[in-house]
Image (cartoon, rainbow, N blue to C red):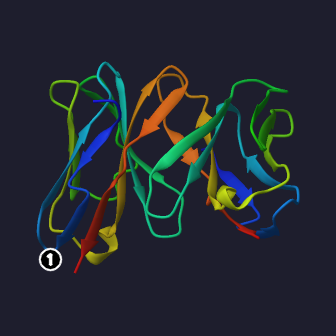
Amino acid sequence: ELKVEQNPLFLSMQEGKNYTIYCNYSTTSDRLYWYRQDPGKSLESLFVLLSNGAVKQEGRLMASLDTKARLSTLHITAAVHDLSATYFCAGEASNFGNEKLTFGTGTRLTIIP
Amino acid sequence: GAGVSQSPRYKVAKRGQDVALRCDPISGHVSLFWYQQALGQGPEFLTYFQNEAQLDKSGLPSDRFFAERPEGSVSTLKIQRTQQEDSAVYLCASRVGNTIYFGEGSWLTVV
């Protein structure tokens, strides 16, 4: 059964700094997803990573996938306040016909002005 | 509609009461999922449909939980004899290709 672990669970950082959130998963995963969740809101899709070495960037966020290490990272460059949110990674297990996602516990990111 | 629509958005139920949560997926989306998200936690899988077929219900926590999607579009998650530990946000999602769209969720509080 696929297990997904994120760290850190909480992250407080100053505006303008760089940081990385790590997502480890336990077994082969077809796809790796990153989501953002604001308080009281639903999940907003950020990235879908499909293959080893995949890298995607949107604004100050960049996600990468290393399937051999079973590791994905979400890198934040020059953080700004409006990036404050909880970030989740989720893996999709390689079971044919089953598309369910397994989520990590989330990283609550607070950007301090 | 443009996105996944869920109702009610907020529900307060007395312990022992039955509740029904509705999900309208994006039109044409074959795959539909239900997740449960407790406060401060990540979403946890409950069940999954392809069209009207329920292919995986392994995440339903007990036989008090029941989900259906009789015509392959709208889905209902029913919780019988609610208990306090059922208090959570229930998220519905639908999928096309590699993108999974989540609804705003139904916030259930059992008192």
The percent position of residue B21, horizontal first and vertical second, equals: 20, 51
Q: Can residue B58 be seen in this view?
A: no
Dot 1 falls on a residue whose secondary structure is loop
Q: Which of B33 and B54 is in front in this view?
A: B33
**In this rendering, would B13 be left or right of A46?**
left
The percent position of residue B62, horizontal first and vertical second, equals: 29, 59
Residue in view at x 67 percent, y 50 percent: A4
Which of the chains bears the disc numbered 1? B
Q: Dot 1: few (<14), some (14–19), or many (≥20) neighbours within 10 Å? A: some
**In this rendering, would A7 be left or right of A37?**
right
Q: Which of B31 and B24 is in front in this view?
A: B24
Residue on which the image places disc 1: B14
Q: Is residue B101 above or below residue B111?
A: above
Residue in view at x 75 percent, y 23 percent: A51
The percent position of residue B83, horizontal first and vertical second, equals: 24, 73
In terms of image quadrants, where is residue A108? bottom right
| Quarter that holds the N terminus of chain A | top right
